[in-house]
Amino acid sequence: MKTTNIILTTIISFLFIGCVKEENPKIIENLFFQPYDINKDYTLYNTIKTKNRENYIYENFELNTGVFPTITSGSFHAYRTVDDVYFLYNPLSENRFVSVTISNIDTSDFEISYDLLRTQYGNGHIKNAVFFWGSNDTYTSFNYYLENNSEDAPGTYIPGIQIGKVINSNYDYWEWHTLENSHSYNKFTIRKINNKYYFFINNTFIIQHNFNNFNGNKIGFVVDANSSIKIDNFKIDYIINLE
């Protein structure tokens, strides 16, 4: 009797596995394998390879695919220039937002990267150029941002990056990092892997932080009063095949 039960249990087990495998081969695989290699160090930029990226958006402004809009609103301008970069200029007294709509990238692992150059800092204590993502339609809440600003240091400005999030217009700062290349392009990379964010500047790890769901589907840039920026090589990739 005991032998019969063992045989029946074995047969039923194989039938169950066979049925599940037919419907979704990944289910059985995930029973035995963790989806992420716990031995990988995701604070190292080169841990993510080309094979781990599946492109969602890429814009180098050479083909002018129109990912970001051309805007002329009074004195505010946003457009692709003759040297194939995206230029935003804001001589007005209030912030200006430029954004595009993204769909459901926060349900997957992803990488966002872009090159940014500050061409003009506004007059005053701190003037910002903010990259934001996961924003709601009114731009009052966006889960995370990189704020390229300048702190007043007795008559001088120190270019740097502030990392944090905004909820209902309340800023939560996490990290300040001084930029070494203040007069040239800096590459910024944000990766979301397994409910963690990893931030890199010029391929060097800066900070990691817990991931939270987006407040909306807007992603883009804010230019503060009397400031201007140039952007190039804007990319969003899904991160895949980490097993």
Image (spheres, rainbow, N blue to C red):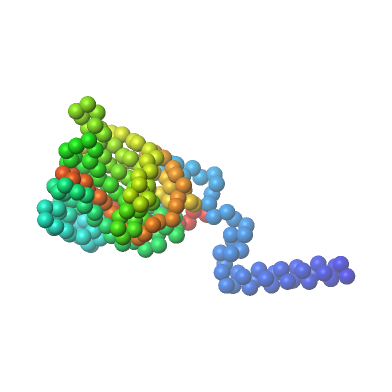
Image side of residue 206 versus residue 227, left or right? right
Q: Residue 156: horizontal and vertical position, in percent?
A: 20, 29
Camera-side residue of 16 and 198: 198
Q: Residue furthest right?
A: 1
Q: Is residue 151 above or below residue 41?
A: above
Camera-side residue of 115 and 141: 141
Q: Residue 66: horizontal and vertical position, in percent?
A: 22, 62
Q: Is residue 2 above or below residue 62?
A: below
Query: Can you see residue 14?
Result: yes
Residue shown at the point (17%, 38%) measured from the top left: 123
Q: Residue furthest top?
A: 154
Q: Residue 141: horizontal and vertical position, in percent?
A: 35, 53
Query: Can you see residue 113?
Result: no
Image side of residue 114 versus residue 44, left or right? left
Q: Is residue 80 above or below residue 46?
A: below
Please identify the quadrant where the N terminus is shown: bottom right
Residue shown at the point (34%, 56%) measured from the top left: 135
Residue shown at the point (45%, 60%) measured from the top left: 107
Q: How many marks?
A: 0
Q: Residue 161: horizontal and vertical position, in percent?
A: 31, 39
**The quarter of the displayed image where residue 186 is located:** top left
Residue shown at the point (40%, 59%) measured from the top left: 105
